[in-house]
């Protein structure tokens, strides 16, 4: 039976007040965003919408018919006006005259740019003919779970007729492309009263004379399918449960242990980022009697398949005896077997002009009693892949509950995965940034240097976990960075680096968020000033706790993760000029910073054999944006030099050899250098970023 979320009716969100006064393209955008706002209607990047609009030709001044249709690679939920392609309808119709038949349908994509209206640079998608040749002005193509559950059933044609009668037609499986566009046109001509059509193993097409009619038809048809499943699919999901569901905390604990190990085993060619999902739909599936046979069938909808690969890897784990040790020991063989099976699938199905085999590792990992782990080139893709597989789970749940679920045939799946048009799209993708797929944890991440470092690493594509003890500043930093780079790329954890439990918990949260760790920037700090005779034991211990013990604790946890991943690692300490050069009135601070530097040297020795690099950046007098310099330290240093606090920045600038001020961004640049492959052969080193200070020259 359907779960509550899957069985709930879709709301009709159309607002006549909002739509009043909109142009037809604006109504298309409005309709698209409404449809894309619910994953039960279509998943991220899936589906398509279009409208035929009468517009003035900028060249001739004549009124012409223009097809507005979602462009290649767009997402209907987030699309803006510039996400639509615009094409002359008369030219799209003229393409029929040069079509050479189904064996040559891919070449028709090359003609679409010749149909462009008003020099629109947005590339048209492969779905354009499917919309152009439906003789209705407004067309929706969606991938609703409830409809695909019908489309992926063994008797999908019979079910479509039973549920919708003559209102909704049915077409057999056909890969999206020019030929399918002609099929849709022929269907509409032969069935002028139909309101839509179900495409076997694919999705739903609906249409209308107005934008509102098209939208409301789409919602109505999906709701009718949901209601039918609610009545007919009343048995236990996937044949019932055969394994227990672990408690939420235990599921998270298992995932934290599995994710870095899996990540290390699959990241040799490209760094991967993980995502964990233990939603109810996933748990129903991974505890069911049908888990392994259904998982082996793969997905049906092409959009699902492209995101989740030929099939998932079911991890050998028994939640009734939740000792993860045997599972961890068996992962290398399980992943190697999956890769070998994938290579065999490639060899069985490849064609003479097929692109070279891509990454043979699984995207989806199903863990009985625990949940689903996905890995991809970045966090957004890993999360979206999980969403697609949840859609696939919902489809399998519906189809297997009322019929027999049918996955995409292997050769068809291969021909989509290695479609030359898909390969061309991949080749057009921009080159990955230097830290794409890398995961960093930055302590003191809400402060000046920490936030500047996170910003610099994220500029290069890294996912970053901000760790700080200041919850207010932490929340503000996460909001700022997520607004700039996207919520997928940044997380925050409240972490007191002097607490073993807090450090372990914070790193565990990082593992659950992103699946592993590549870079530790140990930056948490404080600064104190007092003559030695006025330095209390509490003050001494506070410096040692944060600047020495804290750096030890976070490094130890990072080393444990790095060794489990077996993929190297990178540690950068933010120490201080004072770790090399003594300073009056700051014995506790200087000594603790010196301990940091020597700890880094020791760790560089220990980590080298595992390709774990450890380096140090030594700042000096970073006043602007620094949390340290907003408190007593600024006043104390001004008093030590017998000057006003407002004179400090100029004092430090003039004291430097280069006569320059040092800013958080300067430190972040050095950290990025040491954290990146630009310094791949550097470990145990110190980079001073102090505008020049002879006292701190390394010797």
Image: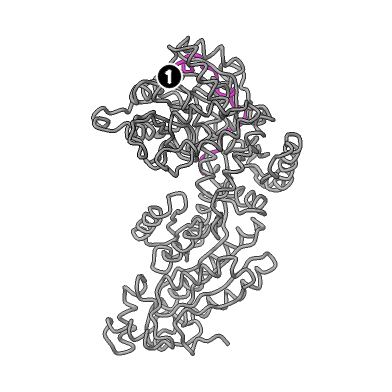
Question: 19 left or right of 389?
Answer: left
**Residue drawn at 66 percent across, 33 percent down:** 415
Q: Residues within 10 Å of mark 1 (few under 14, many from 20)?
A: many
Which residue is depicted at the point 56% across and 65% down? 676
Question: Which residue range is magenta in the image?
Answer: 227-249
Q: Farthest front residue? A: 60
Q: Which residue is mark 1?
A: 221
Q: Nearer the viewer, residue 481 or 607?
A: 481
Provide the secondary structure element on which disc 1 rests: helix
Query: Which residue: 59% across, 16% down?
Result: 403
Q: Is residue 512 above or below residue 550?
A: above
Q: Position of residue 638 (x, y in %)?
A: 31, 84
Quadrant location of the C terminus in the rendered image = bottom right
In front of the other: 569 or 130:
130
- Residue 696: x and y in percent read 50, 86
Count of labels shown?
A: 1
Q: Is residue 356 above or below residue 464?
A: above
> Hey, which quadrant is residue 335 in on the image?
top right
- Up the image or down, 518 lies above or below 71; here it is below
Return the x and y of residue 8 as percentages of the image width and height.
41, 24
666 sits left or right of 154 in the view: left
Instruction: Name the spot of residue 360 as percent of width and height, x first.
Output: 68, 44
């Amino acid at each position: 039976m359907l779960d509550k979320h899957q069985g709930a009716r879709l709301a009709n969100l159309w607002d006549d007040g909002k739509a009043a006064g909109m142009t037809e393209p604006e109504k298309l955008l409005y309709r698209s965003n409404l449809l894309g706002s619910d994953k039960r209607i279509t998943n991220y990047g899936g589906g398509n919408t279009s409208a035929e609009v009468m517009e003035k030709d900028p060249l001739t001044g004549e009124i012409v018919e223009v097809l507005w249709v979602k462009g290649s690679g767009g997402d209907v939920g987030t699309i803006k006006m510039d996400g639509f392609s615009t094409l002359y309808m008369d030219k799209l119709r003229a393409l029929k005259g040069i079509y050479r038949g189904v064996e040559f349908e891919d070449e028709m994509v090359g003609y679409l740019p010749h149909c462009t209206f008003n020099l629109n640079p947005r590339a048209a998608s492969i779905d354009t003919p499917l919309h152009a040749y439906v003789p209705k002005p407004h067309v929706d193509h969606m991938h609703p779970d409830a409809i695909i559950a019908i489309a992926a059933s063994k008797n999908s044609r019979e079910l479509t007729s039973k549920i919708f009668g003559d209102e909704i037609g049915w077409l057999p499986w056909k890969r999206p492309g020019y030929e399918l566009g002609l099929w849709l046109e022929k269907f509409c001509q032969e069935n002028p009263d139909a309101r839509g059509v179900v495409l076997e193993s694919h999705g739903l097409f609906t249409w209308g004379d107005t934008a509102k009619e098209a939208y409301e038809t789409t919602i109505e048809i999906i709701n009718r399918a949901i209601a039918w499943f609610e009545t007919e699919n009343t048995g236990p999901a996937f044949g019932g449960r055969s394994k227990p569901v672990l408690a939420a905390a235990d599921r998270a604990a298992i995932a934290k242990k599995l994710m870095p190990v899996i990540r290390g085993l699959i990241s040799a060619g490209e760094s991967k980022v993980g995502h964990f999902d233990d939603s109810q739909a996933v748990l129903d599936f991974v505890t069911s009697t049908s888990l392994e046979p259904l998982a082996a069938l793969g997905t049906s909808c092409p959009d699902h398949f492209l995101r989740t690969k030929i099939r998932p890897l079911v991890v050998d784990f028994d939640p009734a005896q939740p000792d993860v040790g045997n599972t961890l020991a068996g992962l290398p063989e399980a992943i190697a077997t999956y890769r070998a099976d994938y290579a065999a699938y490639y060899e069985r199905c490849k064609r003479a002009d097929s692109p070279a085999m891509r990454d043979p590792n699984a995207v989806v990992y199903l863990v009985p009693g625990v949940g689903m782990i996905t890995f991809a080139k970045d966090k957004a893709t890993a999360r979206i892949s999980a969403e697609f597989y949840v859609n696939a789970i919902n489809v399998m749940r519906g189809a297997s509950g009322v019929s027999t679920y049918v996955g995409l045939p292997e050769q068809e799946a291969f021909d989509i995965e290695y479609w030359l048009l898909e390969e061309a799209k991949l080749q057009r993708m921009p080159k990955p940034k230097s830290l794409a797929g890398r995961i960093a944890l930055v302590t003191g991440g809400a402060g000046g240097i920490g936030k500047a470092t996170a910003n610099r690493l994220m500029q290069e594509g890294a996912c970053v976990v901000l760790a700080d003890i200041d919850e207010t500043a932490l929340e503000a930093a996460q909001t700022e960075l997520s607004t700039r780079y996207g919520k997928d790329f940044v997380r925050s954890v409240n972490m007191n680096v002097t607490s073993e439990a807090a450090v372990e918990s914070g790193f565990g949260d990082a593992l659950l968020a992103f699946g592993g760790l590549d870079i530790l920037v140990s930056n948490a700090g404080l600064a104190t000033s007092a003559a030695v005779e006025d330095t209390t034991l509490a003050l001494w211990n506070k410096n040692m706790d944060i600047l020495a013990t804290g750096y030890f604790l976070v490094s130890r946890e990072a080393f444990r993760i790095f060794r489990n991943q077996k993929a190297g690692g990178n540690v950068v300490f933010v120490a201080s000029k004072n770790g090399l050069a003594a300073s009056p009135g700051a014995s506790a601070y200087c000594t603790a910073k010196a301990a940091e530097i020597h700890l880094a040297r020791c760790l560089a020795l220990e980590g080298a054999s595992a390709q774990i690099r450890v380096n140090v950046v030594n700042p000096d007098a970073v006043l602007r944006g620094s949390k340290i310099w907003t408190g007593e330290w600024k006043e104390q240093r001004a008093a030590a030099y017998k000057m006003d606090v407002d004179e400090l920045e100029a004092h430090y600038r003039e004291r430097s050899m280069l006569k320059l001020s040092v800013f958080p961004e300067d430190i972040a640049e050095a950290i990025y250098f040491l954290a990146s492959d630009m310094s791949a052969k550097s470990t145990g080193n110190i980079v001073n970023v102090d505008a020049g200070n002879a006292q701190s020259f390394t010797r």
